[in-house]
């Protein structure tokens, strides 16, 4: 049994209602703007899958989280992106809880208890700006902070219950500093604006979330010292890359499965592509099994895996589409959609070309510096 088949079994065992919905729904329905996939993910208990048992969640391991994302990605790319945003946010909160002031633990318990979906406003992909420096500003006032800024794109924009955001705090006195704010969707001043114009991944709800003078009390903002801030970024990026890689790997596994169902792969073609995808999955498994203490080494390793996956998945997709043939490509929107979606893997931060310099420094024995 392949890793992808085991992943599908894990989805059926962990979230049977979601597995049934994904199996019984047409691809176009799952990927359309009116898709109910995110709502089913939530109602099926998906919000608590990665939350540790001590906080009331299902407590899936990092490797199980990878498998779950693979299975979801194979059925619905949009849901994989949206669910991945939530899982990344949960993982980051749990990493922060190791050194936090208790707020993170309380939030995780509330997320599990009330089955809340969490979106993220951390790295912002703006040309020429560092992904580590937040463009969201929190100005200190007497009873808390007022936060303003825009996160775009932000998946789960409509369905999120909570937003976790890295902010640049402007205190009444002293120098600005980094912090993490936890904001309820119901807070006054939060709005969602249309942003996503691409014809694919529409069901991921990747729109612009606008924060305009949103009040957040002191209790909902976590001050992070410089060392902890850096470690939080490292841990967050490791989880983000792991979850994102799993999602796109699952999408290509789903593509191969669809091509096999059409009888378009000969024995040699089938074996070759399964070997490539299985090797990719084992690379992610190696990272997932070493997630107790995320270091610069872990980050460099997961980035290396991610950039290698970009090339492998692009090659596999192109080869499979050529075997599928023009008539199948023309007669269904599935294949054209997958072709576009897989290309989007390149656009997730940090971009490969931007990291060549820092990775070369790391491979030469120096510290890895994020851009």
Image (cartoon, helix red, strand yellow):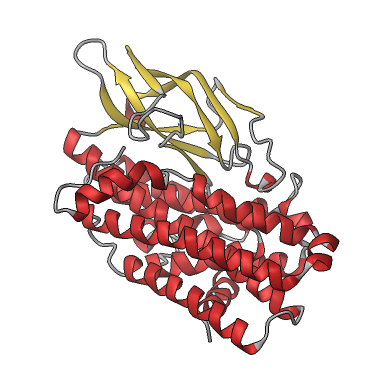
| Left or right: 274 in relation to 122 | right
**Residue 278 x %, y %:** 47, 77
Q: Residue furthest bottom?
A: 267
- Camera-side residue of 103 and 288: 288
Taking 43 as reference, is 355 above or below it?
A: above
**Residue 273 x %, y %:** 56, 77
**Residue sitting at x 37%, y 41%:** 354
- Camera-side residue of 338 and 115: 338
Task: Residue 143: tell me if it is visible.
Answer: no
Dividing the picture into quarters, in which one does residue 327 lie? bottom right
Task: Residue 5: tell me if it is visible.
Answer: yes
**Residue 164 x %, y %:** 43, 37
- Camera-side residue of 167 and 242: 242
Dividing the picture into quarters, in which one does residue 173 lie? top left
**Residue sitting at x 14%, y 48%:** 366
Q: Residue furthest left?
A: 365
Q: How many marks?
A: 0
Taking 121 as reference, is 330 above or below it?
A: below
**Residue 3 x %, y %:** 50, 78
**Residue sitting at x 73%, y 50%:** 35
**Residue sitting at x 58%, y 42%:** 156
| Left or right: 29 in relation to 61 | right
- Camera-side residue of 190 and 303: 303
- The C terminus is located in which quarter? top left
């Amino acid at each position: 049994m392949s890793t992808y088949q085991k992943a599908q079994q894990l989805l059926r065992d962990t979230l049977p209602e979601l597995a049934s919905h994904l199996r019984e729904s047409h691809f176009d329905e799952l990927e359309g703007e009116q898709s109910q996939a995110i709502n089913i993910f939530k109602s099926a208990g998906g919000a608590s899958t990665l939350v540790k048992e001590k906080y009331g969640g299902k407590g899936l391991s990092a490797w199980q989280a990878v498998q779950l994302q693979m299975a979801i990605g194979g059925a619905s790319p949009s849901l994989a992106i949206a669910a991945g945003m939530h899982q990344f946010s949960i993982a980051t909160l749990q990493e922060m809880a190791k050194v936090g002031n208790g707020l993170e633990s309380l939030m995780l318990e509330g997320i599990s208890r009330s089955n809340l979906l969490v979106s993220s406003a951390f790295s912002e992909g703006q040309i020429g700006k560092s992904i580590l420096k937040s463009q969201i500003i929190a100005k200190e006032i007497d009873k808390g902070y007022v936060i303003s800024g825009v996160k775009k794109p932000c998946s789960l924009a409509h369905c999120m219950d909570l937003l976790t955001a890295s902010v640049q705090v402007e205190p009444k006195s002293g120098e600005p500093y980094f912090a993490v704010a936890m904001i309820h969707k119901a807070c006054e001043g939060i709005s969602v604006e249309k942003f996503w114009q691409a014809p694919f991944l529409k069901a991921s709800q990747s729109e612009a979330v606008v924060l305009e003078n949103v009040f957040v009390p002191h209790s909902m903002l976590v001050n992070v010292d410089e060392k902890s801030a850096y470690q939080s970024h490292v841990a967050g990026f490791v989880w983000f890359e792991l979850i994102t890689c799993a999602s796109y790997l699952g999408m290509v596994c789903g593509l191969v499965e669809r091509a096999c169902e059409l009888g378009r792969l000969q024995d040699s073609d089938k074996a070759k592509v399964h070997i490539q995808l299985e090797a990719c999955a084992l690379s992610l498994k190696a990272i997932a099994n070493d997630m107790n203490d995320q270091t610069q080494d872990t980050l460099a390793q997961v980035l290396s895996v991610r950039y290698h996956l970009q090339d492998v998945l692009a090659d596999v997709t192109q080869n499979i589409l050529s075997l599928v043939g023009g008539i199948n490509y023309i007669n269904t929107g599935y294949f054209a959609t997958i072709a576009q979606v897989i290309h989007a893997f390149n656009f997730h931060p940090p971009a490969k070309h931007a990291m060549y310099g820092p990775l070369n420094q790391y491979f030469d024995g120096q510290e890895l510096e994020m851009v």
